[in-house]
Image (tube, coloured by chain):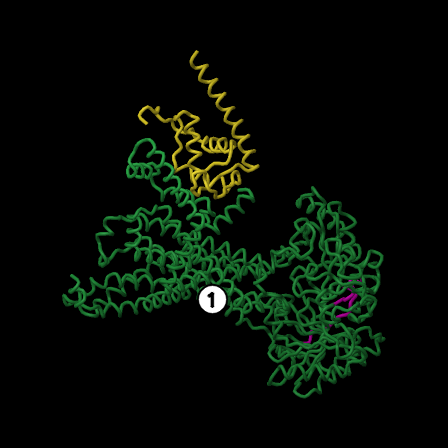
Amino acid sequence: MTPREIWLRLTAWMRRDDLSAELAEEVQAHIDLLARDFEQEGMSRADAVAAARKQLGNVAGLREASRDYWGFPKIEAVLQDLRYAFRGLVRSPGFAATVIITLGLGIGANAAMFAVIDRLMLRPFPYMRAPSTVSEVYLQVTSGARRSTWGTVPYTRFLDLRRDTRSFSQYAAVSEWRLAVGVGQATRVRKVAGVSASFFDFFDAAPETGRYFGVSEDVTPLGSLVAVLSHAFWQSEFGGRDVIGQQLQVGSLLYAIIGVAPEGFVGTVNGRVPEIFIPITTVPANIDRSNSQTYFTLYNWDWMEIMVRRKPGVSEAAANTDLTSAYIRSRNAQRATNPRVLPDSVAKPRAILGALRSAAGPDAGLESRVLLWVTGVAGIVLLIACANVANLMLTRNMRRRREIAVRLALGVSRRRLVAQFIMEGLLLSSLGAVAALLVAQWAGIAIRSLLLPEGSTFNLSSDWRTIGVAGACALAATLLTVIAPAFLATRSDLAATMKAGAREGTYRSSRARSALLVMQGALSVALLVGAGLFVRSLNNVLKIPLGYDASTVLDMFLDFRGLTLDSAERVVVQRRLLATAQTIPGVEAAARVNSGLFRTNTAALRVPGIDSVQRLGRFNFQLTTPDYFRVMRTRILRGRGFTDADGTAAPQVAVVSEAMSRALWPGEDPLGQCLQVSFNPGTRSESAPCSTVIGVAEDAAYQDVTDEQRFVYYLAVDQVDPSLFSAIIVRMREGKIEEGIERVRRAMQAAMPGMGFVVVRPVQEVVDDRRRGWRLGATLFVAFGGLALVVAAVGLYGVIGYNVAQRMHELGVRVALGARSSSILRLVLSQGLAFAAAGVTIGLALALVASRWIEPLLYKQSPRDPVTYAAVGAVMVAVALAASAVPAFRAVRADPNRALRSE
Amino acid sequence: MSDSPTPAPILAGTLDLLILKTLSVGTLHGYAIAQHIKRLSRDVLRIEEGSLYPALQRMKVKGWIASEWKKSPTGRKARYYKLTAAGRKQLGEEESDFERSVAAITRVLRRADS
């Protein structure tokens, strides 16, 4: 159709009534002229008019044929179907509401999961040019039986790989930090991204104002102190004013603002969106690393990630080969400075490209795997919902049997009828999709804190990707739920249906509906088994003794921000801070620790008489003050903990964890044994002094909670280096921990020298975080399993209820013939139970087969746990009974009089 | 009427051509168009009114013809159709298409005869 024709049709459509009248007039003129000619040929007036009428034939048909050109007949047919469908739904609001809610929940579950997965794993970063060619570099080595993959590397590694590879057109270094930004009361902890100057070249994102930093400002050892603000930070903190050239305290250094990134620019964020971008070469000096002059020649600090862009025509496999050989060269260079680096034959080092989003990368944790599983589960929930809706459609179409038969008899084509059914289905699932987006928005906000990094936005009204997925789900749901019932309905035997009359007395069971019902039940049972297994697995994780009690422990991170102190001054300041902490009201005990509680701290460890300690596993150390074990409530099982007597001048002592003692000295007394610890990778540990083991502590889980290898040793911080910067942990007496946090923060902030800054947080949060993956699986599986159960119960209720309604006549006759209430009850309930039994049997079998694949996601939980299976079976049967009880009691009240009277 | 020859069917796709060609002579109403074609074809081609009027509506939305109501010489009000510029172009195309296919069909028929 040409635009002109569309216009002409449109104007014709608007004047279609006028046009119809004009056509009638024109045809009448034609008849008159024709009759006049016939009259002239010798016919009588009456005959002539009759003959003219006859020749014109079917005037209505002529008008109908003309009408096709006044407007757009295909669109009008669709609109007519839509109107018809809408009227049909308004007439049965209960049916419409059930379908819309069921689909809304089913599609909503999928939309919410997609929205989360999309944000965590799929969505390309805003402004990134050709994202398919950009990757992060991941490294892999084998140590012991474990193959580990990680993406955090030393700056020196970045320089080595950039120098020794040929496959990439662009390289960038990225590291994310939380730094104190601003001065005085306005100071806040902000997300700061240290990036190389090349980082901005990965994007097509012209700065909102000012400029980005260049290569000359990103040089080792210390780059220029210049900062680029995020658009959101610029707006919220500076109100969008001209800030170029202003100074901004970021961490310990003062930066000049040189530019603002465009709106929505987030870099390649994992987690919270960065608010400030600074040259990566200013990070080491900023965070007071003692090696801020040497970090680009050493390999002992993993702190940044590498982002690369493949050259055109270079395959990922070729790039991986290139990277791996560069990595091996780099390891050789590293081995020259640190002989502890495992030989290549053992470590089998490899460097590979992976996704920029860590959740989709090769080192993605338990959470990502659980999320993908739950996405599959959401799909199953949708299937169950679709089965339910299909069932409702079948039931509804059976009720409309007569109407359909009449319309078919009147000559409406089967195709047209099916088209109307499909239109009705589309209308329903579109409404369902709208409901789904509301459900997803609401559910998304509820699960956001569990799933997404803090500060993530979750607004689906402008999220076209999620809206698209919801639309696609709705379309799939229409295909699944409408087409088969529509064809089944229009295939019915016309004559038989018409003859059956108004009373639909005959009860007809439908195999299609039964199959759908059993399928729903089976899938819900399988999901519930999954939910049960995840809950039991979470229970097992929660039951693991941690070896400490984190409930009222606060962790204080002390940021001295640019304060230059010599080591003697540092000793004084830190002693004073610890003393302050101990005197805060409500604090039971306080201790210093060398770094955050859950960091990995490894040093060169040697034990006389043991060939290579490293072969046994990974040994973490913790440097502490005497009260440490009191604060953490870690019990000393043998010997003693540290005391104030274990000072600088006293003999060096150590406490080891029970597991470590058993691994190192099986069957021997650990007390009095010697540990040789060397913190400087350059010196050999043979020459390190002996630290005598004075106590054995209970095993404490500082890394992965489920890790069995809890090899930890504790040294007195004063004996290692009393001037070492450290964090402070305090045990609060019972009470409101929130109040305690603020009291402790205020007291410590007042005691901090200079621009010092204190961040206080409950250790329990960190512990919970470590169990998040387990909790996630349990929560989401239970949510979706419950949803599936509800949907299946509604489906069962609907079908049993319909069957009872259909059999009312028969049941009435039975009552009239003397059937007792109990037998009627049994009749209906047994039907519900039969469905439940079939669903449970198939569902449990399904679960048994599928559980093999979720075994790796469970902690010490057999996927074939009989208790879970039995419990789920019982729940399903109980729900089936409850769902059939209501119609069953209605059946008992079947009125024999009505049944007999209608006979 | 009795001496009129047996009417022949309008060849598929030639209705538009006939109407366009007829209107290229001048402005005519529907009845006149039918009469004109009947007369020129010596009563061989008869246009059914049931197809003439829908065809006129179709050609109107295609923009090939335009119409207006006028008094006929006999004093009756009638709708008169005339060719537009687009219609004239369409006529040229349809004419040459038609001639090409007639020539081709004729060639095939002659070859088959000999």
Picture layout, residue A74 above or below residue A606? above
Residue at image location 60% in from the left, 78% down from the top: A551
Q: Is residue A143 visible?
A: no
Quadrant where the image shows the C terminus of chain A: bottom left
Q: Is residue A769 left or right of residue A31?
A: right
- Does the magenta run of residues contain A679? yes
**Which image quadrant for residue A849?**
bottom left
Picture layout, residue A494 above or below residue A454? above
Helix or strand or loop: what does disc 1 sit on?
helix
Q: In x, y percent, where is residue A812?
A: 19, 65
Q: In x, y percent, where is residue A407?
A: 31, 50
**Camera-nearest residue between A389 and B94:** B94
Q: Is residue A201 left or right of residue A780?
A: right
Residue at the extreme top: B114
**Which image quadrant for residue A830?**
bottom left
Q: Is residue A705 visible?
A: yes
**Which image quadrant for residue A599?**
bottom right
**Camera-nearest residue between A513 and A501:** A501
Q: In x, y percent, where is residue A131?
A: 67, 51
Q: What is the number of callouts on the image?
A: 1
In the rendered image, what is the letter of the chain coloured yellow?
A: B
**Camera-nearest residue between A265 and A608:** A265
Amino acid at circle 1: Val
In the rendered image, what is the letter of the chain coloured green?
A: A
Residue at mark 1: chain: A
Range shown magenta:
A677-694
Q: In x, y percent, where is residue A797?
A: 33, 65
Residue at image location 57% in from the left, 67% down from the top: A448
The residue that disc 1 covers is A782
- Does the magenta run of residues contain A493? no
Residue at image location 72% in from the left, 68% down from the top: A233
Q: Could you classify mark 1 by the number of other residues whose Cα lies within 10 Å: few (under 14), some (14-19), or many (20 or more)?
A: many
